[in-house]
Amino acid sequence: MAFKIRTGYEGDLNLFKTPQSVASYGVLLLLLCAAPFVLGSYFLSQIVFVLIYTIVGIGLVLLSGYAGQTSIGHAAFLAIGAYTAANAAKFGVPIYIYLPAAGLLTGLVGWLVGLPALRLHGIYLAIATFAFALIVEEILARWETVTNGNEGMMVKPASVFGERLGEWGLYYLCIGVTVFVIVIAVNVIRSPTGRAFLALRDSETAARSMGVDSARYKTFAFALSAGMTGLAGVLYAHKLSFISPEMFTLALSIEFVMIIIIGGIASLRGAALGAVFMIMVDPLLVFVKDKLPALIGAITGSAMAQDKASVLLAAPGVKSLIFGLIIIFFIIYEPMGLDGRWMKIKTWFKAFPFYKPATFRRQKMYLKSERGR
Amino acid sequence: MTYFALEDVSIQFGGLKAVDGVSFDVAKGEIFTIIGPNGAGKTTLFNLISRLYNVTTGRIVFKDEEITQLNAQQIAGRGIARTFQNIELFDNASMLQNLLVGRHRHSTTRFWEDLFFLPRVRREEVGHRHAVEEVMEFLRLQRYRDTLIAGLPYGVRKVVEVGRALSIGPEVLLLDEPSSGLNVEETSRMAEWILEINRRLGITILMVEHDMSLVSRVSDRVLALNYGRIMAMGTAQEVQSHPDVVAAYLGA
């Protein structure tokens, strides 16, 4: 068993808690940087999507996991970032200007969306953010001078100092932005701002009595989360090189929420794991769709069963059904998500042979009062 | 100079006057206890002081400043801390983080400084940890430093809440039923802490409490409340033997 020995207050404040984690994250980063030399363009673009989803996931983890505010409108923030990038690139603005600008603009919009959050809780807030997403979707379709309406618009490739950013360039840009966003998130979590977030999440009444300005921190959580999503939006636009309003629908927002439910709601590592899962699930489903009917046919030995299975799997909505089942599965059996599972496996090895499942069992409290609401 | 005073404070919820024309003064360094049957308006009074509720009429004054118009988060900034009857800790955070939230009013860093965790933020954080560590030592909470609140027993949570309030560095501490749910031993330890917080740290204490042995052990003065009105005020002995108080508790 390993024990952590504290020798000073500084230890808890470091970006990396142990030398081992410096090593393991360093290796991960090296592997990611080396990937283009080894992997083909299909896998490279999958990794880019994972990184983009990770950024959005981290934004949502801060908002939902730490600050306790729900949002099912994050596709709108992604859209704002994406359309900002598309328009800026159209006028030949270099990416190192419009990337931060898009982040700031989306952050500002997020701050505005955060204002109703001061009066709304839980499901009502979720509905408000959903309404916001619908409004943005509508604006994207109608404001044709800027967005080119439902026809969508091409996104010019990003350029840095006159050089076009190719596939590799975009890949490394994604890694850079992801690392930046993760560092910002860790900084927030280890600073007074992050503590104010979790205070608001667990008991707003107590937080206010401790001097936490709830309005300020709630809107700030929204701004921060939206800003990160805006950055992801820029990358998303360049990755797809064509954007149109029907890409930024409720379905995408739900996918983002799924990232953090599957990954683990209050964990940055969970956001990354959830993003990997969400990107992998599509190719996996395609694979299953292709192979499963043949397998069923082989096992049952009847061509009719094979046909039935392929018709069933090809039916519209199967993907949504499977997504829904996955969410339900995680909420019931692993509320702490993939990260929770990872922690359990790690603890099992660390504590071997003394692991007890009760370590992770949460005590339920029924005393929370609703006073002061 | 008025240190802490309620002047003719009332609050009305629809047709119900939960607190009705209550006035009293608390001197600096005093332990002032409010007792009364269930529904007497004791906690409502605390919620009025900590500005979770708005007064309908009257004023609350702290150090010659009317605090009735401040909002809840400014109250902590004035040095008034509180605990809650039913424990309002941050359940999914560690004990250490809970106490550190108490230090919130002392942090002067801005959002963007926090975002980049500038050296100033780090220096302040170390300072907060020093301060919180002292509170932990005072209440002997060190062994629970990294335990999630959700995993702590009830008695410990009660102490953690006092610790969190102390982390604010308060001048006035509002304790809402500090002994409810505690066993005899824990209650007597709580009494010692209350006395020590008062004597050693020089903090003025306002307390709502039902346990009369605790009340008479620590209180300088006691106020008895019933149906939002003052029934009696004086030493624990005087209030306990006041005929109205006896009638209210036992039923005349």
Image: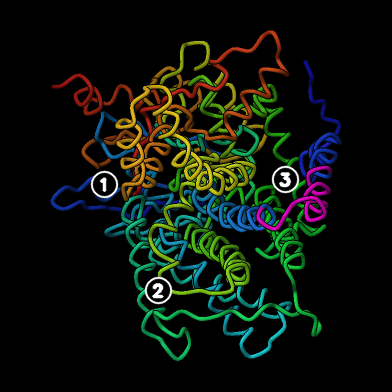
Disc 2: CA contacts within 10 A as few (<14), some (14-19) or many (>=20): many
Residue B19 disc label: 1
Query: Is residue A108 in view from this perspective?
Result: no
Chain letter for the residue marked with disc 2 in the picture? A
Disc 3: CA contacts within 10 A as few (<14), some (14-19) or many (>=20): many
Magenta residues (range): A27-42
Q: Nearer the viewer, residue A19 or B142?
A: A19
Q: Percent position (x, y) of residue A88?
A: 62, 84
Residue at the spot x=54%, y=39% of the render? A264
User: Badges 3 and 2: C-beta atoms under 8 Å apart?
Assistant: no
Residue at the spot x=77%, y=15% of the render? A1
Q: Nearer the viewer, mark 3 or mark 2?
A: 2
Q: Nearer the viewer, residue B27 or A155?
A: A155
Chain letter for the residue marked with disc 3 in the picture? B
The type of residue carrying mark 2 is: Val
Q: Are marks 3 and 2 on the same chain?
A: no
Q: Which residue is mark 2?
A: A136
Chain letter for the residue marked with disc 1 in the picture? B
Q: Percent position (x, y) of residue B39?
A: 24, 34
Residue B137 part of the magenta segment: no
The type of residue carrying mark 3 is: His
Q: Secondary structure at mark 2?
A: helix
User: Where, by quadrant of the figure, is residue A309 drawn?
Assistant: top left
Q: Could you tell me how far apart the alpha carbons at marks 3 and 1 are, in whole angstroms?
A: 38 Å
Q: Is residue B97 above or below residue A372?
A: above
Q: Could you tell me how far apart the alpha carbons at marks 2 and 1 are, in whole angstroms?
A: 48 Å
Q: Which residue is mark 3?
A: B128
